[in-house]
Each structure stands twice: as C-alpha cells, then as structure tokens.
Image (tube, helix red, strand yellow):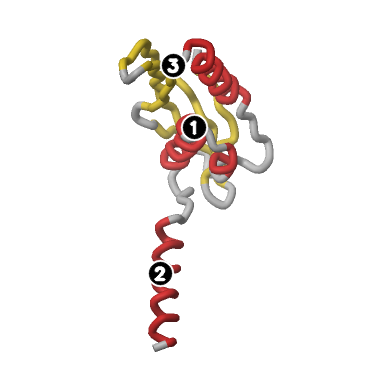
Amino acid sequence: MALLCLGGIGVFISFYDEATKIERTAPDAVVDQFLRAYLVNRDDKEAELFTCKNGLDLSAITALRTELIAREKEFDVTVNVSWSTLTVSGTEENRRTVTTDLLITGSKDGAALSKSSEPWSFALADADGWRVCSTAKIP
C-alpha cells in the first residue's frame, strides 16, 4: 500500500511539474507570458522569469505601467491591457524582436470609458530559453 501511495505521489509531482513548467522555447510565447505577468497581473517576480539577467532595460514598459496605475488612482477606474497578434522578426541566431499593439482600456463599473492602441517592440535574446531584454514604444 505504501508503494502504491508513493507511486501516486510521484505521478502527481510529474504532472504538476509539467503543468507549471516555464516555456521559453518561442519568442512570441515569452512576450505573451511576460506581458501577462507584468501588465495584467503586475507581478514583478513572475515577470522576472521571462527577462534577461544582464543588460535588461524595462524602462519604457515600467513607465507605461506606472502611468496606468496613476490613472487608476486619479480617476477611480480600472485599466486593462491586452495585445494583438505577436509578430516575430529577426535572423540573428540568438536575437529576435517581437512587435504587437498594446490595447489599453479604461473602465468603471463594467463600462468602457476609453480605449487606445499603442505599437510596442520587445527585444529578446536566447539565453537558456528566450527572454525579454528591452522594451520600446514604437513612435
């Protein structure tokens, strides 16, 4: 009976590890996960899982998040961020760029008050999986 329980625990741990595994095999998937962590969940620790260890520059996206939080407080609204299709470009072996439009919606009591779209670019490097190294709003 003890062996059966231990076997069951092993299977559970294996399934849990697979379900919670960080996927860094595709640049667009990494940007998707990074945006979800950084702008939707606003979880810096989670976002760190998808960023470069060296040469990191998140100043542009940090300024955007700071502005969104300030607007929420100033106008007593909820600001939600989503994004359009993530487009990967670049031919260097260890570098890619992902572009997308960030869709920013301000709402109060479930009613949309404002909507805007901003083009953004994310530079990624392949360092033990793809990671976001810098962000920029495209003029």
Q: Position of residue 93 (x, y in %)?
A: 52, 44
Name the residue at 43% across, 20% down: 78
Instruction: Identify the mark nearer the N-term, 1 or 2.
Output: 2
SS of the residue under disc 2:
helix
Q: Position of residue 27 (x, y in %)?
A: 46, 41
Residue on which disc 3 sits: 77
**Front position among marks 2 and 3:** 3
Name the residue at 52% across, 33% down: 42
SS of the residue under disc 3:
loop
Residue 108, labelled with which disc? none
Q: Nearer the viewer, residue 74 or 68?
A: 74
Q: Position of residue 61 (x, y in %)?
A: 55, 25
Instruction: Identify the mark nearer the N-term, 1 or 3.
Output: 3
Residue on which disc 1 sits: 97
Amino acid found under the numbered disc labelled 3: Val
Is disc 3 surrounded by few (<14), some (14 to 19) or many (20+) residues within 10 Å? many
Residue on which disc 2 sits: 12
